[in-house]
């Protein structure tokens, strides 16, 4: 099936008149699964370690799936559909600040940057958490700066302790950065919902959005 025919199939589906299907079920599952997994990991940190680790592995698995689906998925799930260059993104931000940004059916350029930032930050958080589970895992990463490289000959040495502390600090910094990104993401969703008069949270539940009008970018 070509991109055009796939797009028509998504648009015509079972959506009500005046609406189209944008977010496929797997994208929606990823989105809300990631929300639940990250919230669980955050709330269980330092309290229920086994649950924290399971949530972390769930985050890593969801990110792995999204990377695959971003290449092989449906039209609006693909990175090639919504990731745009710096010039387009900056132009969109200028328009947004001026209150004249155009409506995008998929992720708008600013939202696309946020998607990338969330994925990268979550991947880093999950990876550093995985390294922290067993100190010897750091030995597989000789390219890391010395401050986070353990003393391979002596696990009880001061270098190893400093490396573990630095890794833990990095893990916590990335987790805190995630909170900031989440706040910005929620703010962007609220702003776009208000500006374009559509409930974007509901759209990520149902997969359905208002059909494109004049000036909208499909």
Image (tube, rainbow, N blue to C red):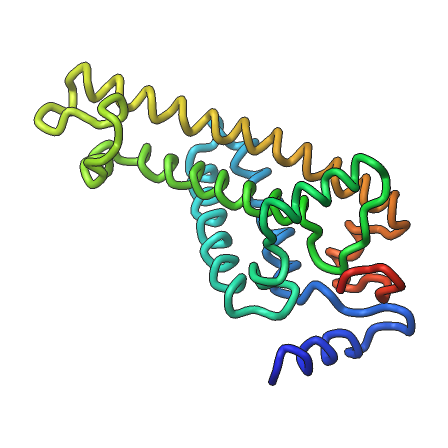
Could you tell me which quadrant the C terminus lies in?
bottom right
* Residue that sits furthest to the left in the current view: 153
Which residue is found at the position 53% from the left and 64% from the top?
A: 69
When asked about the image quadrant of residue 138, the answer is: top left
Q: Is residue 123 above or below residue 42?
A: below
Is residue 216 found left or right of 142 in the rendered image? Answer: right
Describe residue 91's horizontal placement relative to residue 80 as left or right: right
Counting every numbered tag in the picture gives 0
Residue 204 spot, x, y in % from top left? 73, 56
Residue 185, position as x, y percentages in the image: 68, 39
Residue at the spot 89% in from the left edge and 63% down from the top edge: 214
Which quadrant is home to the N terminus?
A: bottom right
Furthest toward the bottom, the residue is 1
Residue 27, by quadrant, is bottom right
Q: Nearer the viewer, residue 103 or 28?
A: 103
Q: Is residue 218 left or right of residue 143?
A: right
Q: Residue at x 49, y 52 (%)?
A: 63
Reply above or below: 147 against 83: above
Q: Name the one closer to the observer, 158 or 144.
A: 144
Q: What residue is at 8 percent from the left and 27 percent from the top?
A: 153
Q: Quadrant of residue 40?
A: top right
List x then y, in percent, for residue 146: 22, 24
Q: Residue 38: percent from the left, percent from the top?
A: 56, 40
Depth check, front residue: 209 or 151: 209
Question: Does 27 sit above or below residue 181?
Answer: below
């Amino acid at each position: 099936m070509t991109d055009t025919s796939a797009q028509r199939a998504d648009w015509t589906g079972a959506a009500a008149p005046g609406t189209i299907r944008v977010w496929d079920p797997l994208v929606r599952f990823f989105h809300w699964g990631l929300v639940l997994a990250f919230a669980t990991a955050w709330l269980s940190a330092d309290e229920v370690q086994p649950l924290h680790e399971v949530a972390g592995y769930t985050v890593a698995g969801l990110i792995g799936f999204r990377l695959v689906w971003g290449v092989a998925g449906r039209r609006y799930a693909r990175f090639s559909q919504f990731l745009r260059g710096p010039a387009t993104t900056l132009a969109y931000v200028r328009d947004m600040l001026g209150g004249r940004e155009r409506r995008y059916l998929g992720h708008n350029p600013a939202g696309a940057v946020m998607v990338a930032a969330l994925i990268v930050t979550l991947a880093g958080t999950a990876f550093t958490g995985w390294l922290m589970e067993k100190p010897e895992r750091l030995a597989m990463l000789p390219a890391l700066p010395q401050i986070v490289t353990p003393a391979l000959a002596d696990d009880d040495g001061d270098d190893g302790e400093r490396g573990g502390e630095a890794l833990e600090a990095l893990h916590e910094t990335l987790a805190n950065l995630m909170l900031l990104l989440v706040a910005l993401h929620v703010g962007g969703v609220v702003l776009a919902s208000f500006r374009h008069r559509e409930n974007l949270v509901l759209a990520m539940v149902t997969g359905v959005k208002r059909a494109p009008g004049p000036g909208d970018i499909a």
